Image (cartoon, helix red, strand yellow):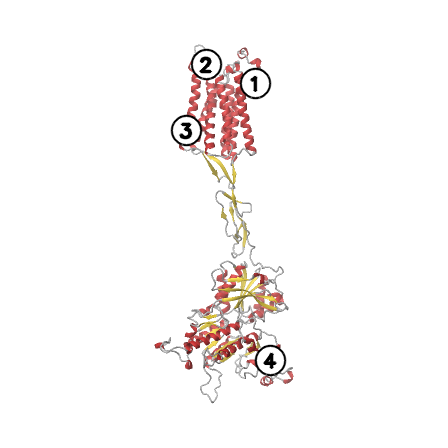
Amino acid sequence: MLGGIFELSYKTIVPDLSFKHKPEHWKCDSLDFEVFQWAHTMIFAIEEINQDPVLLPNITLGYRLYDNCIKLQVALRSAISLIGGLNDSIPDSDCRGLPPVVGIVGDPFSSHSIAISRILGLFRMPLISYYATCSCLSNKIDYPSFFRTVPSDAFQVKAMVQIIKHFGWTWVGVIGTDDDYGQYAVNSFHEEFKKFGCIAFTETFPKAQESVKYLQIVNTIKDSTAKVIVVFSPRANLIILSAEIIRQNITGRQWIASEAWSTSNILATNENFPFFGGTIGIAIRRGEIPGLVNFLLQIRPSSDPNNNLVPRFWETMFGCKFQEGINNENDSILSVTKFCTGYEDIKSTRTAYTDVSESRATYNVYKAVYALAHALHQLMFCENGKGPFENNTCADIKILQPWQLMYYLKKVNFTNRLGERVAFDENGDALAIYDIVNWQRASDGSVTIKTIGVYDKTASKGQELFLSEKDIFWNFYSGKVPESVCSKSCQPGTRKATRNGQPVCCFDCVPCADGEISKENDSIECSQCPSDFWSNPSRTQCILKEIEFLSYEDAMGITLTATAIFGSCLSVSVLIVFIYYRNTPVVKANNSELSFLLLLSLTLCFLCSLCFIGEPSNASCTLRHVVFGISFVLSISCILVKTIVVIMAFKATLPGNNMMKWFGVTQQRGTVFMFTFIQSLICVAWLTSAPPFPSKNTKHQNSKVILECDVGSLIGFSCLLGYIGLLACISFVLAFLARNLPDTFNEAKFITFSMLIFCAVWITFIPAYISSPGKYTVAVEIFAILASSFGLLGAIFAPKCYIILFKPERNTKKALMGR
């Protein structure tokens, strides 16, 4: 004998418990056609097994079915009746009574199964649930005799989270029942979902049907910005909730249904569709059971007199009353509008009872019965001496104990007629495979529950979820996948910045800083570009930094190049003039040889600035400083010697002074060579120890790579400049002291002025050089070279060229020897 517990009625009339008189029995009302189909599927499976000559030969299975009326009290009473024989009537012909129940199929509720399993576990009586999914029931210490043909909520939650993650929903609301099933599921969902999303709200259905509490839940849904709502609940709670949602006209929500209500035809109706259409749910695996439809259509009130549920079903189906029922209930015959004959045509009806297109819980009931049958079959064909029990004994099926059956039930592993493997894992759980369903409109306008995907936990990692997105109906005006986020997704080029005191899903999108990028949506942080790269304006890619150096192509380079060439041409022109007029008094009086050498060195000074323009290389970096240093020392040396000559010449005019013979042409040449040679030694020492080299400066300007010449040795560079400055200062001091000498050919004034310009330029150059960015640093250095070169050329040679070219009458010995 097998027992069965089903939720055949979804309304319960609680008896008066005032303790003033003996309480009546709980009354069950409003028969559920769909669950009535489940109960008759158990009968169908048992009769099919009894007719099978191979499975359990010569053994007949019987059944005893109970209605739990969706109440724990009634469910417990049903379970105790099955194992204890309560309300059994023992006929006189058989004092042994009915055969004992060896296993129970049910209960569909997790909270009921928990309570029943605590009792059945004491006797090791198997309980196979076809709908209880609470993950807590996998605990074999607390529930040793519990099995199920429906996957655990642990897998259901994983499937739900995978769907939500697939569509990018990170801001969801959760509702669960105030029982073990709901709370365990909600807690598991929290743990899985918090890895990538946030819970906007969590509400709990009350145990009692309190309208105030349901109103609070609906108000929370209405006020929340979350568009996706996950509900772990039996359908009874959803019936009340849907009524309030319809009353308040709340639309634009995406419902995610647990398997307990995802395929309920009571909820998937035309009335509910505007509000719950498009619901995506986790559904128990569907299976088409051959011959079930014909069996269901053969039901008659007279076919099984002991089945008191069939008359109730018949009356509800056809809206009539049986004569016997009226007499028993003391109803007035006058109040009955239609009497039942028992021969009404059930084939003409279209209800959830006859609809086997969504055989999900039905299929689980079918598998549960067959699992018990196969366990009994293994027990029956145990070979003596090879048995699993004490002394290798076997169990006797005629005096079977439930704990013996439980041993074989743990090892059940068979393939049923539909080709599906049926087995239990070490926790008594079924293999975790779900259908993903979607509430849609059928072609005839009715509501249909369509399978749109599969979740298979046994598949390879990353392949567990399959969804046919083109087949999904979205109940939104756009007809597209809805968004459910606390904050809009951060686009590439930005990063998420969490808001203080709010969940991590509520954030602001902050643009990446300069030099940082983010390539993906919702980046938590921006990544730094490599040193030679910089972020593009949208901060989505690292692009090569702009290369900057003073080139011959840009305006500044062209200007400076033209100025340098002009200066060198001007120097050459002056040199030509001086050579051409070398025999005139003005040229002779100003030490023509030193003037020629000075003009050549100034030409080099102008031309050396060209070494500073263009992309730096090892050759140009070395050349620019060497040429610059030597050419300027050569120029200053010539000026210094000219200054000394002026002073010597004045001293030589005094009576008895022969100083000029000690500083003749040879000494002048030697002095210039010596000063220049010292600078050459400085350059050689510098280039030998740490020569200048081209480098990439990425620190001064982050968005650019500045190509420049690193001086290598700062000491060497300082010595080069310092030596030039020393000679210039000496020249300036000597020229300044000799500026008032009375000779008409005295150059000291011009030299003083030229050195004043030279020193002013290079003193100003230092802060300008340090503060100038990028290529302007080189430009400042070139400007200093050109400005000081023009200063020397103009201050010293302009007056002489003026006399030579424009005042030839003054270019005579008489004019020079005038007053």
The residue identified by callout 2 is 651
Distance CA(mark 4)–CA(mark 3): 117 Å
Q: Secondary structure at mark 1?
A: helix
Mark toward the start of the polypeptide (1 vs 2)? 2
Counting residues from the start of the chain, the first of labels 4 and 3 encountered is 4
Residue labelled with disc 4: 315
Separation (CA) of disc 1 from disc 2? 28 Å
Which residue does the numbered mark 3 point to in the structure image?
A: 684
Label 1 vs label 3: CA separation? 41 Å
Residue pushed farthest front? 53
Q: Which residue is mark 1?
A: 802
Q: Residues within 10 Å of mark 4 (few under 14, many from 20)?
A: some
Q: Quadrant of residue 437?
A: bottom right
**Residue 387 or residue 552, whichever sits in front:** 387
Q: Nearer the viewer, mark 3 or mark 2?
A: 3
Residue sitting at the far left: 391
Give, as a three-letter code, the residue at label 4.
Glu
**Could you classify mark 2 by the number of other residues whose Cα lies within 10 Å: few (under 14), some (14-19), or many (20 or more)?**
some
Identify the mark nearer the N-term, 1 or 4.
4
Q: In the visual, does 97 lie left or right of 230?
A: left
The first of marks 4 and 2 along the sequence is 4
| Residue type (three-letter) at the residue carrying disc 1 | Tyr
